[in-house]
Image (spheres, grey):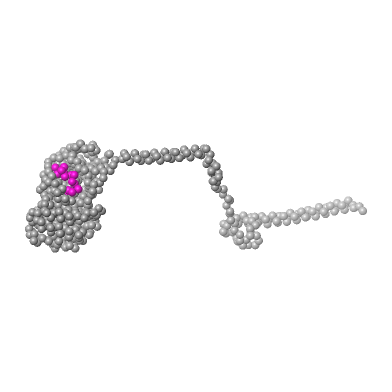
């Protein structure tokens, strides 16, 4: 049968409507699916923006990105490509090429040429460098000043006070303390002589031991004066008294065993002729071994010429001799240094020290006290001072002067001082400062400690000399103890390897009424220099090769 045309059109219209409805449903379903996926993607973006530690670990369904709940994201670094170098086979293959073989030989030759060149240069420097002069043998009595305390009661109210004052003595860079005499004896009565007993007025053996222990801790050696008849006019009672010398020998052995570092005796020229003298020498100077501290035998003489002192040094065999040559006339002073400078390590210098007097007994003015302090510290030999010299203590007429302490203590409103006393105190402070500066300099400067001596100028009232040692700084001492200004012309005798420069630096200067413009650390010409009355000056110039 055949369908009508109208019927056929109706069927087609129904089929198109059905298809359109199906398509619409598909599109709606697709939209729903896309909306859900979009929501999931947006949520994943939000979670990714959160700190990984704050992302949710629980929830329904699968976590964004397809991970399961509870999983942790880890970033695994990409593999880094590192250079591991060539293999052994590759290195051997390259090393054997002609280019690398030539390079290695060139580098090897250059290395050895450089090494040989440096060795040759070092040898040339060593050969051409100036040789250091060997330092002479130095004993403790050569390393600094000696400090005499003849009257321990006037010094510190007895031996117990000496121990307490060792700190003050140490500040002066003193290397030896000479004590006494301390023993008991009646004037000019040899029967009362007891050299092994300390006079109770000054202290006891226990006090002396305490002094020894503390002094040694401070690097100070102690010498004991055993001059037998020290209160009388004849130190040995009678010439070359063998019995008395024998007693001194026994006492020396006793005190040395107790810790004393040396023995001092007066009138050396007299006692050294005794038949017992060699025995005393053996007690003090015997058993000397390398590496052990030497005991010193010290002698005092007076009234001898420089030549006689030199001869006595050789015949007596003492380690140190103290003379009064500096207290003699000016001409003898200059001659004494010219004669004795080669024996400086056995020579002690002092002004009044041989009589145990203060320096001020002969140096009558503050400028002369400073002058002689400078002279003693720079002369070739060991400077010897009596207590109080470091402050310019005025010597007494008959009795030993009382030592003055606490000079740095200034007066107060509660305890004011008169102008005269204050002027004396300030002078003591100034002299002590000058003394310490000289002592510090001598201890550390080799030219002053053990240097060679060269005279430069001399007259009745002035002198000048040069001290030098090898490559150390050199020093020139110039002093004028006269009452008029004096112009000093520096003249150095022809000496191989030694010459004066045109100028020098003023290291220290002291004195009044000076006509010289020389002040500390200024530069002066070494052609000539004018010194005022009582002026002393110390010049320095370097070694120049």
Q: From the top left corner, tell me how far across and down residue 152 is, in percent.
A: 15, 58
Quadrant position of residue 93: top right
Q: Nearer the viewer, residue 159 or 525?
A: 159
Please, what is the dominant secondary structure of the magenta stretch?
helix
As drawn, the residue found furthest toward the right would be: 1
Q: From the top left corner, tell me how far across and down residue 52 is, in percent.
A: 57, 57
Could you tell me which residue is drawn at 34 percent across and 39 percent down? 124
Can the viewer see residue 360 in this picture? no
As drawn, the residue found furthest toward the front would be: 275
Could you tell me which residue is drawn at 70 percent across and 56 percent down? 33
Decide whether residue 56 is among the magenta residues: no
Q: From the top left corner, tell me how far across and down residue 139 is, in percent.
A: 22, 51
Q: Quick one: quadrant of the C terminus?
A: top left
Q: From the top left corner, tell me how far across and down residue 45 is, in percent.
A: 62, 55
Q: Nearer the viewer, residue 530 or 317?
A: 317
Q: Which residues are magenta?
A: 335-350
Could you tell me which residue is drawn at 49 percent across and 37 percent down? 102
Could you tell me which residue is drawn at 23 percent across and 37 percent down? 496
Please tell me whether residue 320 is drawn above or below residue 69 in the rendered image: above
Q: How many marks?
A: 0
Decide whether residue 339 is among the magenta residues: yes
């Amino acid at each position: 049968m055949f369908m009508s045309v109208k019927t056929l059109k109706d069927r087609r219209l129904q089929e198109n409507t059905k298809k359109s409805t199906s398509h619409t449903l598909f599109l709606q379903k697709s939209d729903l699916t896309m909306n859900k996926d979009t929501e999931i993607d947006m949520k994943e973006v939000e979670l990714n923006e959160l700190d990984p530690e704050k992302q949710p670990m629980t929830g329904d369904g699968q976590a964004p990105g397809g991970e399961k709940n509870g999983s942790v994201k880890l970033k695994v670094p990409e593999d880094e490509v590192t250079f591991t170098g060539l293999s052994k086979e590759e290195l051997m293959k390259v090393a054997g090429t002609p280019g690398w073989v030539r390079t290695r030989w060139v580098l090897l030759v250059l290395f050895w040429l450089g090494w040989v060149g440096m060795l040759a240069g070092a040898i040339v420097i060593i050969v051409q460098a100036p040789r250091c002069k060997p330092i002479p043998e130095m004993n403790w009595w050569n390393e600094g000043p000696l400090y005499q305390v003849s009257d321990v009661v006037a010094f510190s109210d007895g031996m117990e006070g000496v121990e307490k004052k060792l700190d003050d003595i140490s500040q002066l860079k003193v290397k030896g303390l000479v004590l006494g005499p301390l023993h008991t004896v009646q004037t000019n009565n040899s029967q009362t002589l007891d050299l092994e007993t300390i006079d109770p007025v000054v202290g006891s053996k226990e006090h002396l031991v305490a002094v020894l222990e503390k002094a040694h801790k401070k690097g100070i050696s102690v010498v004991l004066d055993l001059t037998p008849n020290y209160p009388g006019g004849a130190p040995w009672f009678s010439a070359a008294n063998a019995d008395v010398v024998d007693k001194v020998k026994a006492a020396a052995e006793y005190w040395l065993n107790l810790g004393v570092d040396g023995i001092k005796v007066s009138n050396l020229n007299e006692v050294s002729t005794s038949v017992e003298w060699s025995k005393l020498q053996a007690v003090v100077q015997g058993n000397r071994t390398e590496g052990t501290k030497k005991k010193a035998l010290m002698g005092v003489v007076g009234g001898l010429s420089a030549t006689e002192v030199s001869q006595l040094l050789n015949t007596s065999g003492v380690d140190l001799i103290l003379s009064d040559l500096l207290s003699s006339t000016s001409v003898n002073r200059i001659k004494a240094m010219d004669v004795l400078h080669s024996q400086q390590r056995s020579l002690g210098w002092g002004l009044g020290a041989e009589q145990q007097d203060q320096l001020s007994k002969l140096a009558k003015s503050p400028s002369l006290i400073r002058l002689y302090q400078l002279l003693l510290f720079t002369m070739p030999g060991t400077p010897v001072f009596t207590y109080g010299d470091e402050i310019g203590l005025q010597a007494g007429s008959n009795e030993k002067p009382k030592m003055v302490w606490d000079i740095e203590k200034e007066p107060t409103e509660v305890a004011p001082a008169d102008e005269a006393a204050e002027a004396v105190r300030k002078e003591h402070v100034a002299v002590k400062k000058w003394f310490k500066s000289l002592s510090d300099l001598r201890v550390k400067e080799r030219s002053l400690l053990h240097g060679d001596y060269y005279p430069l100028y001399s007259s009745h009232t002035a002198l000048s000399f040069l001290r030098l040692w090898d490559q150390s700084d050199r020093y020139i001492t110039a002093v004028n103890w006269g009452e008029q200004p004096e112009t000093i012309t520096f003249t150095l005798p022809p000496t191989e390897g030694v010459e004066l420069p045109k100028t020098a630096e003023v290291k220290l200067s002291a004195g009044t009424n000076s006509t010289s413009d020389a002040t500390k650390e200024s530069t002066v010409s070494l052609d000539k220099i004018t010194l005022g009355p009582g002026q002393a000056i110390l010049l320095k110039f370097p070694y120049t090769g």
